[in-house]
Image (cartoon, grey):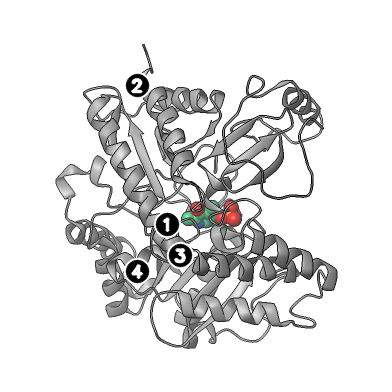
């Protein structure tokens, strides 16, 4: 291997390219991959990682890249966060698995206690742990149906909730998530989202909620609704920030009609948006909340947290799974949450949001390619359009992302129309590295097409 792997987690926090990206070793591995790995599993940037720390990835060719994606909002605490590494090492030596449903252990309980106290609302709560975001969403739906005795689940345009059978049905976008993977689960109803940039007549969140509620009442029937499931800021769907009042209006409609309001905070949670959870921004208190991505510094873990009487309505044995709340993942989560507290990562996300938000807003003024800039905290995006229109330009987003990658900055694309470039930097990124990453992005946008 060309890179230095010397046991020291802290590799220099700098961008430095020594080959083209991807380099020759990555290209070799990519070839090997093509005859071993199913082609349905694809990679945005086929650069093979050797090591990572903080906000920097080092690839097998020795290139150092600035990571503005955090493995899709997972390593908010940074790659190889010291407390996470330490907790995992200690736990691996102690034991790696017993199955919590067979013989339990303390760290599972401690993670649930943290979830119960960190999530919005001071009511009594309970949590259950799972392996992936999709699994958490599936379980939230199971619990909501069981607790209400109702079946209908309301989701929104542009929603993303996962790739399992039930969560494919909940997800909006056909390609690549759903195409020819049906049939899908029944009793899922899709309501219109509040999407201010694409919905300029409905900039008022209450009015956008009324439009959704009218659809629910006429097409589903209020008394059939088990839950309304929504991402407080949509992730894969394009970093869509609903107009203020949208979430609160939906939540109060749910309360009035005995339906549960379920916030999918899998991408927005754990300090990402400047609060521990994005719902806090508007004082919305969900009945159930799903978490995953940012929870455990990179180890697979997910949770459902909710009102005690709802969570405890399920019979013993009704929830669980072999690996759910694996002890190594729980140790990582405790290390990760401790890091977020110690370093005040919600505060860091707000500072990142101010810097990135201002930079992207400037880019919107200077480049006709940028139709909208939006986000909250360290979850920010630009939506690219054909100049002078709102017509999505996915090709431009792809080209701008490719240019950033070639220059050693990892950015992600997203959006129903594939035309959004999203930034999800590790919350521990230095000001200097963040500014350098933004310079590269701005350069790529401004030079596009010229
Ligand atoms: C990523 C994501 C999921 C699915 O999580 P997986 O761990 O990939 O199953 C669900 N909801 C939201 C909002 C997500 O961003």
Judging by the rendered image, the residue that carries numbered circle 4 is 280
Q: Earlier in the sequence, mark 2 or mark 3?
A: 3
Q: CA distance from mark 4 to mark 1?
A: 17 Å
| Residue 346 location (% of width, % of height) | 42, 62
Identify the residue at image location x=78%, y=28%.
Answer: 29
Quarter of the figure with residue 442: top left
Q: Quadrant of the N terminus?
A: top right
User: Is residue 209 in sight in this rendering?
Assistant: yes
The crowd level at tag 3 (other Cα within 10 Å; few <14, some 14-19, many 20+) is some
Note whether 123 is above or below 447 in the view shown.
below
| Residue 44 location (% of width, % of height) | 59, 33
Q: Are marks 3 and 1 in contact (CB under 8 Å)?
A: yes
Judging by the rendered image, the residue that carries numbered circle 2 is 446
Q: CA distance from mark 4 to mark 3?
A: 16 Å
Identify the residue at image location x=18%, y=43%.
Answer: 200
Element at label 1: helix
Identify the residue at image location x=40%, y=75%.
Answer: 120
Image-based side of 382 in relation to 312, left or right: left
The crowd level at tag 2 (other Cα within 10 Å; few <14, some 14-19, many 20+) is some
């Amino acid at each position: 291997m060309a890179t230095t792997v010397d046991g020291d987690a802290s590799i220099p926090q700098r961008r430095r390219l020594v080959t083209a990206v991807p380099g020759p070793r990555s290209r070799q591995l990519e070839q090997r991959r093509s005859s071993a790995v199913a082609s349905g599993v694809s990679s945005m940037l086929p650069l093979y990682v050797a090591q990572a720390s903080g906000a920097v990835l080092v690839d097998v060719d020795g290139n150092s890249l600035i990571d503005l994606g955090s493995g899709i909002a997972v390593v908010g605490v940074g790659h190889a966060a010291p407390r996470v590494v330490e907790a995992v090492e200690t736990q691996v030596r102690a034991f790696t698995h017993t199955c919590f449903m067979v013989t339990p252990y303390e760290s599972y309980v401690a993670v649930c206690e943290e979830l119960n106290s960190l999530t919005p609302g001071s009511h009594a709560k309970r949590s259950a742990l799972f392996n992936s975001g999709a699994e958490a969403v599936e379980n939230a739906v199971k619990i909501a149906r069981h607790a209400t005795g109702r079946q209908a689940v309301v989701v929104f345009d542009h929603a993303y909730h996962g790739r399992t059978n039930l969560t494919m049905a909940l997800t909006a976008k056909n390609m690549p998530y759903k195409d020819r993977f049906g049939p899908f689960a029944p009793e899922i109803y899709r309501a219109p989202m509040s999407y201010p940039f694409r919905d300029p007549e409905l900039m008022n969140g209450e009015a956008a909620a009324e439009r959704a509620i009218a659809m629910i009442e006429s097409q589903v029937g209020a008394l059939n609704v088990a839950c309304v499931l929504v991402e407080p800021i949509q992730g894969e769907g394009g970093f869509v920030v609903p107009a203020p009042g949208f979430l609160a209006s939906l939540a109060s409609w749910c309360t009035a009609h005995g339906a549960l309001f379920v916030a999918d905070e899998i991408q927005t949670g754990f300090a990402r948006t400047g609060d521990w959870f994005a719902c806090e921004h508007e004082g919305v208190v969900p009945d159930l909340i799903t978490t995953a991505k940012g929870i455990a510094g990179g180890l697979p873990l997910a949770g459902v947290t909710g009102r005690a009487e709802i969570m405890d309505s399920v019979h013993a044995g009704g929830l669980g799974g072999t690996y759910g709340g694996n002890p190594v993942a729980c140790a990582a989560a405790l290390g990760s949450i401790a890091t977020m507290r110690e370093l005040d990562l919600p505060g860091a996300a707000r500072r990142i949001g101010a810097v990135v938000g201002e930079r992207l807003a400037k880019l919107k003024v200077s480049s006709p390619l940028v139709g909208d800039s939006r986000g909250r905290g360290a979850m920010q995006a630009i939506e690219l359009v054909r100049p002078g229109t709102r017509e999505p330009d996915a090709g431009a987003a792809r080209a701008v992302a490719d240019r950033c990658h070639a220059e050693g900055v990892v950015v992600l694309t997203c959006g129903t129309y594939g035309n959004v470039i999203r930034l999800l930097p590790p919350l521990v990124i230095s000001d200097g590295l963040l500014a350098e990453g933004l310079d590269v992005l701005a350069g790529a946008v401004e030079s596009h097409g010229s």
